[in-house]
């Protein structure tokens, strides 16, 4: 009986060991799957980084200096619009003067003198702003004349550049 008991315990221990071995194998398979998923995730991350780099390379970058120059040009264009408004005011005043002279109603000197004073003020403002605007526009045009655009990637380049600093292709002037 003792042998039977020992034999039964041995069978239970062997069955239990088989169950544990199956669980260990199952855990090893699970760990292997997790390692495979981790490798796939790492590859996906590398691929995403490469795609981001491609997008960055294909998107033309505008330097902060160029953005500042463009903003300055926008400001100047707004001032040019004001000059155009002043020119319209001057034309209106000239039309009023003409109308008053042609009416022969004995226009008063006070009206003419005030209109003339207003006209002089407008011309002074126009010449002051116009001179400043012309100087600024000349500076910007001079700087812009030194900048060319790469025919391949569209990046701004200096006109004496032989190769694009962005895409590396040989620079050809248009």
Image (cartoon, rainbow, N blue to C red):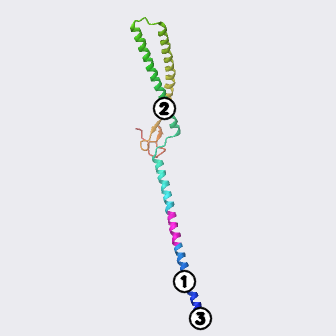
User: Which residue is depicted at the point 49% across and 8% down?
Assistant: 110
For the record, the magenta segment spans 28-39
Residue placed most toward the observer, 163 or 141: 141
Which is more foreground, mark 1 or mark 3?
A: 3
Label 2: which secondary element = helix
In this picture, is 24 found above or below 132? below
Residue under pointer 2: 74
Residue under pointer 1: 15
Label 3: which secondary element = loop
Query: Which corner quadrant holds the C terminus?
Result: top left
- Which mark is first along the chain, 3 or 1? 3
User: Which residue is depicted at the point 57% across and 92% down?
Assistant: 4
- Which mark is first along the chain, 1 or 2? 1
User: Which residue is depicted at the point 49% across and 15% down?
Assistant: 118
Residue 82: percent from left, percent from top: 47, 24
Residue placed most toward the observer, 125 or 117: 117
Is most of the magenta stretch helix, strand or loop? helix
Residue 18: percent from left, percent from top: 54, 81
Mark number, residue 1: 3
- Which mark is first along the chain, 3 or 2? 3
| Magenta segment includes 33 | yes
> Tag 2: Cα neighbours inside 10 Å, few (<14), some, or many (≥20)?
few
């Amino acid at each position: 009986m003792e042998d039977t008991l020992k034999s039964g315990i041995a069978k239970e221990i062997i069955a239990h060991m088989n169950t544990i071995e199956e669980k260990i194998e199952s855990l090893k398979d699970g760990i292997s799957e997790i390692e495979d998923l981790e490798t796939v995730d790492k590859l996906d991350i590398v691929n995403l980084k490469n795609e981001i780099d491609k997008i960055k390379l294909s998107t033309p970058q505008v330097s902060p200096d160029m953005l500042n120059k463009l903003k300055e040009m926008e400001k100047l264009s707004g001032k040019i619009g004001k000059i155009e408004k002043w020119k319209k005011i001057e034309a209106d005043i000239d039309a009023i003067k003409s109308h008053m002279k042609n009416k022969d109603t004995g226009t008063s000197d006070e009206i003419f003198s005030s209109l003339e004073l207003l006209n002089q003020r407008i011309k002074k403002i126009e010449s002051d702003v116009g001179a400043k605007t012309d100087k600024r526009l000349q500076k910007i045009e001079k700087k812009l004349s030194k900048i060319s655009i790469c025919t391949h990637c569209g990046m701004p380049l200096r006109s004496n550049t032989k190769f694009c600093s962005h895409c590396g292709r040989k620079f050809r002037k248009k």
